[in-house]
Amino acid sequence: MVERTKIIDTDVHNYQADAALLPYLPEPWRTRVAASGIGYAYSGYYSHVGVMKKDAIPPEGGIAGSDPDLLVKQLVEAYDVEYAVLTGVVYNISATHDPDYAAAICSAYNDYLIAEWLGKHRAFKGAIAVSTLDPQLAAREIDRVGGHPDIVEVIISSAARSPLGQRFYHPIYEAAERNGLPVAIHPGAEGGGSSTPPTAAGYPARYIEWHTCLSQMFMAHLVSMVCEGVFVKYPKLKVVLVEGGIAWLPPLLWRLDKNYKALRASVPWLTRLPSEYVRDHCFLTTQPIEEPDNPQHLIDLFNMFDAENMILYSSDYPHWDFDAPDAILKKLKPEARRKVFYENAKTLYRL
């Protein structure tokens, strides 16, 4: 029997109708959204199972994940979740084209999140969304709302125009560090709008390919952040890789460490092995957890890196591949389970 532990869920998607942001939008953006909606960029890949859990649609209708009371009933109360980090979906605006519009949508969402979600339940904590299209505007937004007591992180999209370690993006990391907030990187619009192709080989044909290959984006962004010296330049910065898988990390770091030993002259700002920077600065979330036929194989892989101190539990509520906390990682030892499901997030978010 799996030992019951306290739970902090680090990826809970709260949704809203486009019109919900209208009171928080200035002109000319209010008129634009009122006339044609927000216009998020999505990947464009069709999922025959849909995106949402069918039972997460509010009884009176609307979008799954848009009813705070139902979210509390189905997630917080059902699994005794102490804190739920609300990640929204607004980060997908970074795959559109107009940096001023994208920044305005993020600001409106952040005000909406604070006003209409964070006070609804003691468990709710918020991730403020910023657009990567203009990192200076993003930094200004982090400074504007990052000090709110229920805001625990900044969230950006992994769908970008270039690897996220490049110095173009550094104002975001500087502002996050200044405000004591981790930066979460989340997928959703890879291959859509103005973002790069969703795989290293280009555009696949089907959702199953797109969904499986999302880890490629995280590999590229992580290597970029390490090699561009993000964690040297911002030594207090923490980064959370959300919904990108976990099992790829050890072999990637083996390869990067080996290359560093021969090619360190190209990254002279690094004074330690790349894997050491990742260990000290990065976290990964459980959902979607890799599930081999033999569960012990995943535990064996976890033993190849500092997994019990680098992994955070996430459910991905209310998406189709929701992972209930009592359904995954049953073979973890009790101490490791407490860290993954509760203690790591409590320390990271200073809850």
Image: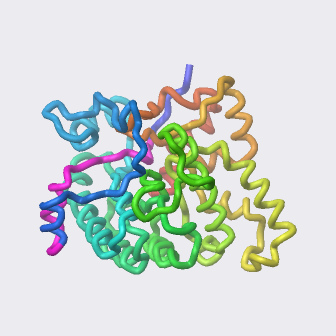
Q: Position of residue 142 (x, y in %)?
A: 37, 72
Task: Write the residue at 80% across / 67% down.
Answer: 260
Q: Is residue 36 left or right of residue 78?
A: left
Outermost residue toward the top?
1
Q: Is residue 113 left or right of residue 94?
A: left
Whether 342 is drawn above or below 239: the answer is above
Tell which of 336 and 294 is nearer to you.
Answer: 294
Task: Write the residue at 31% across / 57% down.
Answer: 40
Task: Write the residue at 65% across / 74% down.
Answer: 229
The answer to which quarter of the image holds residue 51 is top left
Task: Write the residue at 50% across / 74% down.
Answer: 169
Asked if one can make out residue 223 in the rendered structure from this viewpoint, the answer is yes
Q: Is residue 249 left or right of residue 261?
A: left
Whether 227 is drawn above or below 290: the answer is below
Q: Position of residue 221 (x, y in %)?
A: 59, 62
Q: Is residue 132 left or right of residue 72?
A: right
Magenta stretch, residue numbers = 8-28
Quadrant location, the N terminus? top right
Tell which of 56 and 116 is nearer to you.
Answer: 56
